[in-house]
Image: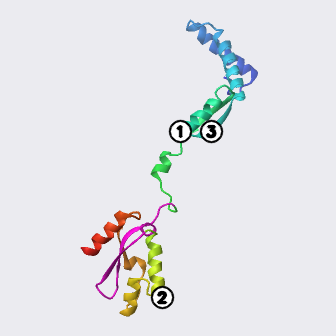
């Protein structure tokens, strides 16, 4: 009744109708006045209460919220791992397979020989090192050295490099590299 834009006469008519319904259903008509007063107090309490939002991180968040328990500040907790974040992926955060590390194979475009290697940095960075050695005729890379000796050309990374296994640097990577060298 208070939420509608009614004239004073229409509001009184609505109030009388509600009181008549209360009487017809054996309710005390003073209930309407109690409800009106209760809503006024609730509205006043809501205006005084302030809210603070915290991202739930665990024990620390519980400790902080206890500090505000006896104040007029209420705490709303939110989660950082929402369903939206779990189900959607942003393209800038998705790494390509060439941004990871592990064991790789380089194929020479004009002959059937292959080179097996490993890298703790990204595959892209390691390929750039092979390419730089080829371009500047440095013989640090065995792959670049073979291309230069046999007068082969260098192709794009996507055509030259195959990723054998993605893993982090360590004994596992050493074992994987040796396995693929000897099979």
Residue at 42% in and 78% down: 157
Q: Is residue 35 above or below residue 100?
A: above
Q: Is residue 89 left or right of residue 67?
A: left
Give the position of the C terminus as an image quadrant: bottom left
Residue at 31% in and 67% down: 176
List the residue tagged with mark 3: 53
Res. 115 image quadrant:
bottom left
User: Any mark on residue 23, and which?
Assistant: none
SS for callout 1: loop
Res. 3 image quadrant:
top right
Dots 3 and 2: beta carbons under 8 Å?
no
What colour scheme does the image use? Answer: rainbow
138 or 128, nearer to the observer: 138
Q: Is residue 52 left or right of residue 92?
A: right
Measure the alpha-carbon separation of dots 1 and 2: 54 Å
Q: Is residue 24 above or below residue 111?
A: above
SS for callout 2: helix
**Disc 3 packing (10 Å; few <14; some 14–19; many ≥20):** few
Residue at 42% in and 67% down: 101
Asked if residue 22 is among those painted magenta in the image, a careful observer would answer: no
SS for callout 3: strand
**Disc 1 packing (10 Å; few <14; some 14–19; many ≥20):** few
Q: Is residue 10 above or below residue 33?
A: below
Residue 104 in the image, given as x and y percentages of width and height: 36, 73
Magenta residues span 93-119
Residue 150 in the image, given as x and y percentages of width and height: 35, 93
List the residue tagged with mark 1: 58
């Amino acid at each position: 009744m208070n939420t509608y834009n009614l004239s004073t006469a229409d509001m009184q008519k609505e109030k009388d109708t509600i009181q008549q319904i209360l009487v017809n259903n054996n309710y005390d008509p003073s209930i309407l006045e109690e409800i009106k007063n209760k809503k006024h107090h609730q509205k006043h309490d809501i205006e005084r209460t302030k809210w603070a939002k915290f991202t739930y991180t665990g024990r620390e968040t519980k400790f902080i919220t206890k500090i505000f328990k006896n104040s007029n500040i209420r705490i709303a907790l939110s989660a950082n791992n929402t369903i939206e974040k779990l189900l959607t992926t942003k393209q800038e955060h998705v790494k390509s397979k060439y941004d990871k590390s592990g064991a790789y194979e380089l194929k020479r475009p004009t002959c059937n020989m292959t080179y097996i290697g490993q890298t703790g940095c990204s595959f892209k960075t390691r390929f750039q090192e092979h390419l730089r050695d080829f371009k500047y005729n440095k013989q640090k890379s065995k792959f670049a050295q073979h291309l230069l000796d046999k007068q082969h050309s260098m192709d794009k990374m996507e055509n030259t490099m195959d990723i054998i296994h993605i893993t982090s640097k360590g004994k596992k990577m050493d074992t994987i590299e040796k396995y693929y060298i000897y099979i």
